Every structure is written in C-alpha cells, then in structure tokens.
Image (spheres, rainbow, N blue to C red):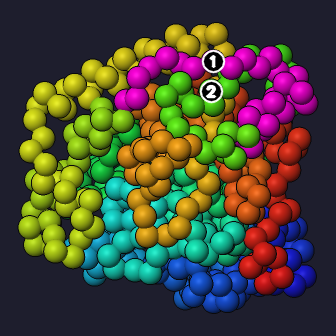
C-alpha cells in the first residue's frame, strides 16, 4: 500500500488492519510524517512535530503485535493534539509568547487515555492565543491555512487540528470547544467535528490548576472532542475519551452510550427542527442555500419530520463573553499580560484589561439560565435541531471575521453565532460537511441533540454521511499528494 493510500484510510480501518497484521504501525506512522513534511510548510497545522516520539510509539505497537498482545482501540493510529491540551514532556505553547518555552510535567486526561489506547502522537496543532478566537493566527507561529484554499482561514480555535485532518496528515485529532472551536474548523475544513455533552470527556489540568493560567480555562463551557474524516472514527475516539475522572468535577458517569454502536441504525420518525438564522443572524446566501438543502435531506431521504423553527432567544453573545471572563483566571492572565502584553494578541489584552463588574458576570449567568430554559422547552418538541454551523464560508486569513454579511454590518465575531449558545447549554452537537460553495469552499451543518442525547447526534450524523458522503472528496492540494 502506498503512503498516499495509507493517509487516506480512516482510523477504524487503520486500527483493524494493524490488528490483522495487514499493515504495520511503523509504515502508517512514516506515511503520516511524510505527509506532514510535504504539506505543513504550506498549511502550518503543527506548532510542534513529535516525530521521534511517534516512531517510538509506533515501534512499541509493532512489538506488541508481534508478541500477540491485546491491543488498545487506537493502537498504531496517528493522532494530532491541539496545543491547548497539556502534554507531558512536549511543549504546550498555547499560541502565546508567555508560554513559548513551556513544557508541562503532566498530561491532560485525554492524552493519558489516547496513549493508553495505543495512539501515535504526531504532534501539537496550532491555535490562536489561548483559544480566545475562532481563527488560526497567533503572535508566535505562522498562521494556519485552509487546505481547500491556503489563502483562507481554517477556522479555530482548533485550527491546526482541522487542517491536519482535512489534509490527511492524521486521521484523528483532538480539539477543544469552548464556543464552537471543534465545530468551527470542522465546518471550514470540510470534516466531522463532535462536541459531546458537558462532562462526557474530562478536562484537566488547565482549568483546575493554578500553575497553568490560560490553558483550557473555560471550565463551565469547554469540551474536548474528536475531529475526524468519518463519523465512525469520531465514535471510536469517543469510546476512548469518554468517562468520568475525579480531577474534573463536571465529569459524568459512563455507560448510557455505547459509542461503537451509536452510529448504527436509522433515524426514521425523528422530529427535526431547522433554524436558518436563529431569527436574528445575518447569514451568507450561499450558506443559507447549502445548509438548507442539507437539512432537507433529513426529510426527503432519512424519514424525519422537518419543521422550520427558532428557539426564540435574543442574541446571548454578550452574556457568553461574561461567562468566558468568569471562567478565566483574570489574576493570572492579567499578570501575564503585564509582562508580555506588547507581544500578545491585542483582542485578548483588551479583554483582560476591561473593568469587568460582578453584575456583568452574574447577568451572564442569569442569561445562560434563560437560554437553557428556552432550549429545553423548545427541544421537548423535537429530537434534533439543525442549523448552519457558521454564518459564512471560510474567509481570508488575518481577520477575526467578516464585518459585512448578507449586506448587513455585523461585529467581527457574529459569524460564530450558531455555535456558542450550545456551549452555554452543554448539549451534544456536531458539524457535518453540508456541501461546497461555487468557489469550492466547505460549508457545515450543525446537528444538535437533546440534553445527554449524544447517541442521537452520532446516529443522525452517520445517517447523513451515508446519504451525502464526503470522506472521499479531498482538497486539490492533497488529492495527488
């Protein structure tokens, strides 16, 4: 099998073929590293390449195979890890000059788990500074670019993870999602991204340890989740990631979801709502058309009842940022900004410098309660809620977001309007590739489930994938790589 063929294999197939001794974990790893060497000078997906570690881990899996040992679920599968996720002995720079030389002495829970499952860590992926942005540029690294058009953003904050998977550098990547940061790059890069219910995947050490101000700090909003080319690959990774851990007080018991079978079956008879704009967002006309056509698949091909309906809240973005600030280590990060502020991202320094009041923070908490209450009432009539993932297709690098959408002046963060409310509610949500613009740029459809209904979201995503497959379509820059 050629390197290109190995890089095109889904993680489920790589794991199976390694177990059956049809391919070697060493050759899979070398294929991934060759693809990184060939493409990453253009895409800048990786902030740190761990080639020696990857080769050592692949050799360990190969030795285990030769000894006939029981293999972990991800044995020999290459994976990329977002650079906001702590990795023992591997730099975790968080896109910040303050952490340029930082090397953690412990792993995040999810890194412990993928290592125990036999995954091969290829490297750390690029992020905006501390993840406080939906794009992929930061003060210390080259800007991550979109494999479908390198002039365009890959989205963020899991920017490099999206680009790595979309270009076939790794079949799996870990992202984190505090306001859409798994779903945003998934949509912009034409891949699958899954944000499980709050507490499904434990988060540590960032938001629990005063030694790490800024790392994974949005305790009541953030989720770590899989970014993959196929829904089955995400389910496989979730089978490794999910389950409680005492280091995360928000983590919930396991057992109510069988991740490996969650993608099976159909969704006939489900009641599905589609909101094209929440009732207030400006949405690019091509996105409206493509996402609307994808939503129609649920009625026309998947046997669902589809209604156009909005949950009925007013734009909660101001409240969302109050929640972010309330989760932020203001003391630690303000001290950091005093030392490094001239080198840091201006929008982050400005956020930290604002004189936030207790009333602003409590108003944000009250607004979250309103959104949650409005959502559970709305979802009592529906099994799933669909929206476009983002209001716009990928746009040029170097910007936080477009300021004119659908002929309307909007804030540069308005394009994220579909994703962050689902972090406020904690519901499961995914972004599936919905189609492409006339210029060949990906557009995503967001699939939202009821509280704790992760299996419904995965099953619906898998059914949509079968009806409108995407995994065999590659960016032109890598189709022949």
The quadrant holding residue 370 is: top left
- Residue 226 vertical placement versus 379 (above, below): below
Residue at the location (79% across, 63% down)? 10
Element at badge 1?
A: loop
- Residue 407 vertical placement versus 450 (above, below): below
**Could you say which disc has been placed on residue 309 in the image?**
1
Q: Is residue 256 magenta?
A: no
Task: Confirm or deny contact between disc 2 and disc 1 (CB under 8 A).
Answer: yes
Residue at the location (89% across, 27% down)? 300
Residue at the location (40% across, 29% down)? 315
* Residue extent of the magenta highlight: 290-316
Q: Is residue 295 magenta?
A: yes
Q: How many labels, in total?
A: 2
The quadrant holding residue 307 is: top right
Element at badge 2?
A: loop
In this view of the protein, which residue sits in the foreground, 342 or 463? 342
Residue 364, x across and y down, in percent: 26, 29
Q: Separation of disc 2 and disc 1 at Cα? A: 5 Å
Residue at the location (73% across, 63% down)? 439
Horizontal side of 340 relative to 224 (left or right) equals left
Residue 467, x across and y down, in percent: 89, 41
Residue 390 visible in the displayed image: no
Residue placed under numbered mark 2 in the picture: 275
- Residue 86 vertical placement versus 110 (above, below): below
In this view of the protein, which residue sits in the foreground, 385 or 246? 385
């Amino acid at each position: 099998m050629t390197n290109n063929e190995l890089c095109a294999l889904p993680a489920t197939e790589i794991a199976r073929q390694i177990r059956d001794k049809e391919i070697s974990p060493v050759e899979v790893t070398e294929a991934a590293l060759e693809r990184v060497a060939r493409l990453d000078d253009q895409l800048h997906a990786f902030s740190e390449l761990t080639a020696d570690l990857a080769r050592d881990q692949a050799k360990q899996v190969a030795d285990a195979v030769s000894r006939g040992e029981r293999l972990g679920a991800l044995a020999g599968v290459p994976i990329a890890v977002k650079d906001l996720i702590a990795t023992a002995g591997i730099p975790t720079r968080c896109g910040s000059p303050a952490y340029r030389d930082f090397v953690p002495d412990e792993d995040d829970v999810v890194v412990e788990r993928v290592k125990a499952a036999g995954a091969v860590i290829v490297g750390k992926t690029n992020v905006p500074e501390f993840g406080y942005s939906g794009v992929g540029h930061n003060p210390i690294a080259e800007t991550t670019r979109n494999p479908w058009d390198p002039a365009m953003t890959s989205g963020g904050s899991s920017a490099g993870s999206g680009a790595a998977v979309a270009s076939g550098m790794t079949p799996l990547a870990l992202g984190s999602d505090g306001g859409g940061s798994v779903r945003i790059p998934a949509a912009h890069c034409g891949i699958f991204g899954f944000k499980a219910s709050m507490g499904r995947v434990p988060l540590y050490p960032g938001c629990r340890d005063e030694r790490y101000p800024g790392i994974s700090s949005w305790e009541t909003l953030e989720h770590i989740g899989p970014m993959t080319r196929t829904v089955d690959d995400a389910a496989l990774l979730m089978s490794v990631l999910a389950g409680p851990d005492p280091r995360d007080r928000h983590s919930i018991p396991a057992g109510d979801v069988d991740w490996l079978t969650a993608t099976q079956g159909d969704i006939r008879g489900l009641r599905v709502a589609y909101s094209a704009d929440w009732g207030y967002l400006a949405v690019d006309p091509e996105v409206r058309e493509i996402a609307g056509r994808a939503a129609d698949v649920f009625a026309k091909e998947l046997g669902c009842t589809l209604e156009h309906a909005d949950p009925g809240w007013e734009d909660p973005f101001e409240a969302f940022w109050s929640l972010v600030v309330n989760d932020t280590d203001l003391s630690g990060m303000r001290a950091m900004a005093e030392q490094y502020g001239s080198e840091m991202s201006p929008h982050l320094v400005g956020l930290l410098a604002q004189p936030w009041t207790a009333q602003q923070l409590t108003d944000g908490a009250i607004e979250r309660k309103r959104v949650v209450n409005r959502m559970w009432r709305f979802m009592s009539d529906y099994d799933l809620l669909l929206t476009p993932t983002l209001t716009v297709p990928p746009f040029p690098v170097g910007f936080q977001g477009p300021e004119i959408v659908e002929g309307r002046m909007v804030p540069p963060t308005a394009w994220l309007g579909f994703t962050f409310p689902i972090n406020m509610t904690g519901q499961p949500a995914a972004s599936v590739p919905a189609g492409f613009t006339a210029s060949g740029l990906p557009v995503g459809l967001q699939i939202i489930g009821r509280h704790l209904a992760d299996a419904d979201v995965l099953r619906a995503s898998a059914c949509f994938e079968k009806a409108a497959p995407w995994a065999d379509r590659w960016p032109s820059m890598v189709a022949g790589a």
